[in-house]
Amino acid sequence: MGHPSMPYLFSALVGVATLAVSLLSARRQLRTAEDRIASAAARRQAQLERLRRVARATLGQARELRAARRRKDSIELACEELEQRLTAAGAVDRRVYVLDDRRTPVDAGWVVTVAHADYGGRVTGGLEKTALDRWKRGRRFLVWGLDEAKVREKTNARYPEHKGFSILSVKPYLD
């Protein structure tokens, strides 16, 4: 009886050995899979951290962009207001022309505003529209004279009424 059981015992030992080798291989594959899962989880966590940092940076940049746009809008509004003020200031001619520089020590300075309604038609043609408009509104001249009457006389000699000129005002010059 001892003899026929030997192949059974041998096949049982081979089966146990094959099972042990299979279990070791399965255990090695399980450890490898666990390592891969742990590595993938670490990569996932690192990726999440990078995404969070990028999202925070993007949010900060969006805030900065909104603030920059608000600053740009307020600067554009200030520029428009400044341009309007410059246009309004340019509409008023602040120039003072000097009628002549001959004067005596007792002469005083006077600002005389002289206008001409049709300077282009009666005096000289070919002037720009702005120059003609300035003549219509009146040009200011610095005139030296003893008193207002002398200043009017001096101004009328250069810009006579019979040629369409008119004196709008005579005021003392305060330098």
Image: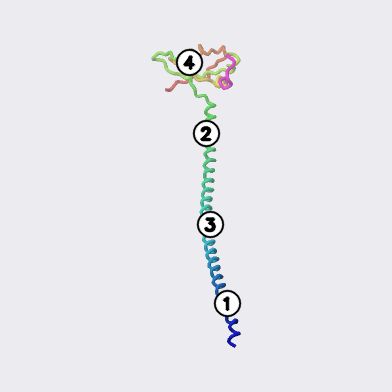
Q: Tag 2's secondary structure?
A: helix
Residue pointed to by mark 3: 47
Counting from the top left corner in percent of width and height, residue 135 is at 55, 19
Most foreground residue, 156 or 127: 127
Q: What span is in magenta?
A: 124-132
What amino acid type should be assigned to the residue bearing mark 2?
Leu
Label 3 – label 1 distance at C-alpha = 49 Å
Mark 3: few, some, or many residues within 10 Å (few <14, many ≥20)? few
Of mark 4 and mark 2, the one earlier in the sequence is: 2
Label 2 – label 1 distance at C-alpha = 100 Å
Residue pointed to by mark 1: 14
Counting from the top left corner in percent of width and height, residue 70 is at 53, 43
Of mark 1 and mark 4, the one earlier in the sequence is: 1
Mark 1: few, some, or many residues within 10 Å (few <14, many ≥20)? few
Query: Which mark's residue is nearer the viewer, 3 or 4?
Result: 3
Residue 126 lies within the magenta run: yes
